Structure formats: structure tokens, C-alpha cells
Image (cartoon, rainbow, N blue to C red):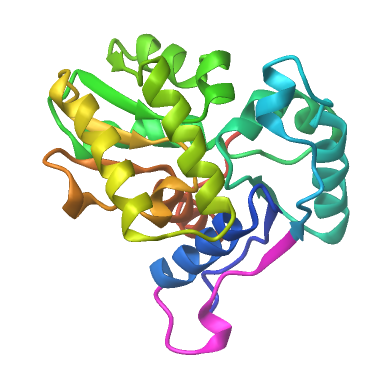
Amino acid sequence: MDEISRIVGVLGGMGPDATVDFMARVIALTPADKDQDHVHMIIDHDPTVPNRQLAILDSGEDPGPAMAAMAARLETAGADFLVIPCNTAYVFQDNILAATGIPLISIIDETIAAIGESSPGADTIGVLATDGCLKAGVYQNALRENELKSVLPNEDELVQLMDLVEKIKAGDRSEAVTGAMQELANALVSRGAQAIIAGCTEIPLVLDETMISVPLISSTDVLARRTVQLARGELPLPDRE
């Protein structure tokens, strides 16, 4: 199909199931009648990248150099732009930008931009994200810049959320895990959240919009949709900052 003119470079493996889920959503969102209609993706699936949470919490190795190397490999392989199906990884985006000359599409920025479409009029947004992502403040800052308020997990809820994320990473998508994630989302709704951001790409593996009473903004879905649009040439690539 002539419309597909750009190659996507995917920094994957953070975590593995979330990467596969992202790819599946890209495929599902692509209008296609045959193989040749689909998006060309080059995947560097490296689960050995150091733990992003531990690095932010000052107890782990810096993953920035490993992600920079991945990004450089993808650019050399022919990628026209880069995506990362991991929210916390964007805390280290400066490493990637310094190592490449192609655009990096931010899952954070795209998710914030999607709020107006999915939740018009909402001004208080719940954020389910990892402890590292929340400590870095990437979602809180982006919401504040857009004059939106955030509702976050409390300390006990965040401990529970991290336990659930680790279980999902280990392959557990049981009713117990699903139900507990639903309870965490509903706790944010009870404290005033008018929409919920699934700000960790493991969360949409167990939580969907039918399970809560307010819109669920899946960062995975948002990034997948934008990836398809950019790869098919439906939108111009953003300029490098």
C-alpha cells in the first residue's frame, strides 16, 4: 500500500509482554487487507535493559546508555522514527535524543493529548503508573502544564500497584490480579478522577474501559494509534526539539 512510507523503530522488552501487546494493537489498528498493507516495524526487544524504576529510585543501574544504544541500532537499521511502549523509559529520553537524529514519539505527551478526545470537559485525571514514573513526575507535570489536576495512588495503593505490575510481568493475568487492578482504578475514581490514565503498559493487559465508570486512557492504545498514523504518512513527523 503506497500510504505506508515510514519505518517504525520500537525500543522493546520493557517489559516483553507489553511490547508484544503494543505490536498487536498496531496491527489491529492498521486498515489492511493483506500482509503488504501493514506497518513496517523494526523491533529491538531487549529485556536486559536495567530496571527503570530502580534507577529513578536511586538504587539501580542507569538504563539510559542501553536505551541509547538500542535507539542508535534502530536508526542505523532504517527506522524513520522511534517509539517505546514503556512509560517510565521516557524519563531517560535525553539519552536517546543525544544518540539519534530521528524523532522519538513520547507516550506521555500523546496520552495527555488524548484526554480531550476521550474525556472532553474532564479536569481531574487519575494516574495509575509505577513508583518510578510517579517519582519522576512526568505525568503530573504534563497534566499541570495543561491545567489539569491529578489524582494519584496513595502510598499503600502504590505498593499494591507495583506488586500487581510485577505479577503481570511474570505472566499472571488471573481474576485476582484483574480485580485488584480494578479496585485501584475505582479508588482514584472515588477520590474525584473523571478519567483514568493507564500510565504503565502492563496495566492494559488486565484493565479495560468496561471495568470502570469513567473513561480509561490506555497509553498503549494511544501510542499504537499515533504510530499507525505516522507510519502510514497520515500525519507529518514532529520536528526534533
Can residue 240 be seen at all in this image of the molecule?
no
**Callout count:** 0
Nearer to us in this view, 151 or 169:
169
Is 177 colored magenta in this rendering? no
Q: Is residue 154 left or right of residue 83?
A: left
Looking at the picture, does residue 142 appear above or below residue 77?
above
Res 79 → quadrant: bottom right
Looking at the picture, does residue 9 appear above or below residue 56?
below
The residue sitting at 31% across, 59% down in the picture is 175
The residue sitting at 39% across, 75% down in the picture is 31
Q: Which residues are magenta?
A: 31-43
Quadrant into which the C terminus falls: top right
Is 36 colored magenta in this rendering? yes
Nearer to us in this view, 78 or 183:
183
On the image, the x and y values in percent for residue 98 come to 83, 27
On the image, the x and y values in percent for residue 53 come to 65, 28
Can residue 183 be seen at all in this image of the molecule?
yes
On the image, the x and y values in percent for residue 105 come to 58, 39
On the image, the x and y values in percent for residue 71 come to 80, 44
Nearer to us in this view, 10 or 186:
186
Q: Is residue 131 left or right of residue 186?
A: right
Looking at the picture, does residue 45 appear above or below residue 189?
below
Looking at the picture, does residue 126 appear above or below residue 140?
below
Res 151 → quadrant: top left
Q: Is residue 42 left or right of residue 182?
A: right
The residue sitting at 52% across, 80% down in the picture is 37
